[in-house]
Image: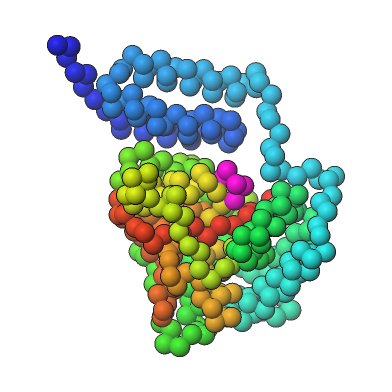
């Protein structure tokens, strides 16, 4: 009887992947896809103890990375990047709705004392960007940034009853600063202060991850991601999104349960939601954009997510044992960290469409 192969040490694979991700070429979307898409296969080969196949696969990936990085193949056009000479036709009904959303956003910032009436800028209080001033994009700029794809997604969200609205998030403020503005301007009966998990730390969160790996259903590995300072500066202090503002988003049952009807772990659900959002050209919310969305809802006395928790795809804790989610529990807003291996039937994903901008 042939001897069973011993498992190989998968921690070395993780270290190698992290080294690849730290290289300049990782910013090329083709290299990102190649590296991120190899994680599961490499771990599978290590699990099988197939050293020869593992080494061949690693060598193949390295060769492909070098071929791309050395520009031996052309860089494809990014479908999300708008040609600056292209003018998007925006239906008048949508323009009117977006203008109304923009005005409402200004009123929300004034109500929560984020931007003074008549002013258009705020100063960052995040450590690495503290004191930097970020001017709110104008409505005209946003109209110029919108692409035909975003308009199409807006219409689809409307058709699905998701109540899409324009949202501007002052990403340069600390999470706890935004929460303090909610707590200092309570609108609901018996409302108490916002609960924030001790794992929701601005400096350690990973923003805009390229993906999530739940090949081990009890762990959630965050793929890629940016520091908060990087995210602030690349967006000039403002996230511009079309956000689903429907009061309660219901769980996606196809993601919640497997084919046998068993509830999947939160890690699995987040990984699947993220893939679905990216395939649709959407993303989820960060801690900051969730608090901004909740500000609008609370000012209108209709807090979002009172029946289900929404996962926060756009800002990851980065600890494979925990995941980020948020809710309203009748008296307060909550930013929480759940165990990745917990099986939950109460998770939903509040989608948003990022408006690509010219800086």
User: Furthest-bottom residue in view?
Assistant: 189
Location of residue 329 in the rendering, given as x and y in whole percent from the top left corner: 40, 75
Instruction: List x then y, in percent, for residue 143.
Output: 78, 58
Can residue 280 be found in the magenta stretch? yes
> In this image, 333 relative to 164: left or right?
left
User: Hey, which residue is sitting farthest left in the picture?
Assistant: 1
Q: Is residue 75 magenta?
A: no
Q: Is residue 76 above or below residue 309?
A: above
Q: How is the image coloured?
A: rainbow
Report the residue at 19% width, 18% height from top: 4
24 relative to 58, above or below: below
Would residue 4 be seen by someone viewing this image from the given angle? yes
Q: Position of residue 31 (x, y in %)?
A: 55, 30
Question: What's the magenta region?
Answer: 278-282
Q: Nearer the viewer, residue 279 or 212?
A: 279
Above or below, 222 against 184 in this view is: above
Asked whether, in this view, residue 146 is left or right of residue 184, the answer is right
- Left or right: 236 as drawn, with respect to 35: right
Is the residue 328 above or below the residue 185 in the image? above
Relative depth, front residue between 124 and 75: 75
Q: Is residue 299 left or right of residue 343?
A: right
| Quadrant of the image occupied by residue 130 | bottom right
Asked whether 144 or 198 is in front, the reply is 144
């Amino acid at each position: 009887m042939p001897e069973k192969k011993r498992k190989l040490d998968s921690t070395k694979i993780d270290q190698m992947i992290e080294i690849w991700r730290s290289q300049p070429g990782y910013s090329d979307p083709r290299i990102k896809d190649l590296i991120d898409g190899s994680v599961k296969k490499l771990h599978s080969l290590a699990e099988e103890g197939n050293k020869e196949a593992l080494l061949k696969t690693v060598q193949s990936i390295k060769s492909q990375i070098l071929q791309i990085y050395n520009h031996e193949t052309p860089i494809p056009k990014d479908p999300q990047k708008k040609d600056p000479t292209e003018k998007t036709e925006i239906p008048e009904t949508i323009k009117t709705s977006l203008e109304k959303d923009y005005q409402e956003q200004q009123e929300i910032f004034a109500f929560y004392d984020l931007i003074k009436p008549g002013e258009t800028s705020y100063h960052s209080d995040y450590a690495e960007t503290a004191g930097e001033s970020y001017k709110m994009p104008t409505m005209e700029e946003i109209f110029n940034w919108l692409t035909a794809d975003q308009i199409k997604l807006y219409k689809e969200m409307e058709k699905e009853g998701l109540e899409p609205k324009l949202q501007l998030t002052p990403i340069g403020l600390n999470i706890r600063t935004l929460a303090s503005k909610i707590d200092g301007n309570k609108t609901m009966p018996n409302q108490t202060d916002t609960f924030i998990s001790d794992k929701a730390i601005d400096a350690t969160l990973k923003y805009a991850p390229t993906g999530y790996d739940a090949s081990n259903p009890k762990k959630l590995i965050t793929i890629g991601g940016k520091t908060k300072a990087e995210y602030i500066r690349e967006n000039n202090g403002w996230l511009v999104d079309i956000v689903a503002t429907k009061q309660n988003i219901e769980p996606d049952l196809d993601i919640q349960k497997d084919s046998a009807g068993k509830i999947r772990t939160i890690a699995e659900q987040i990984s699947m939601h993220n893939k679905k959002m990216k395939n649709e050209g959407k993303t989820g919310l960060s801690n900051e954009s969730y608090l901004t969305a909740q500000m609008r809802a609370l000012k209108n006395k209709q807090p979002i997510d009172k029946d289900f928790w929404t996962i926060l795809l756009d800002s990851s804790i980065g600890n494979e044992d925990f995941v980020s989610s948020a809710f309203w529990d009748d008296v307060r807003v909550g930013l929480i960290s759940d165990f990745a291996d917990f099986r939950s039937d109460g998770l939903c994903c509040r989608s948003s469409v990022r408006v690509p901008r010219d800086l």
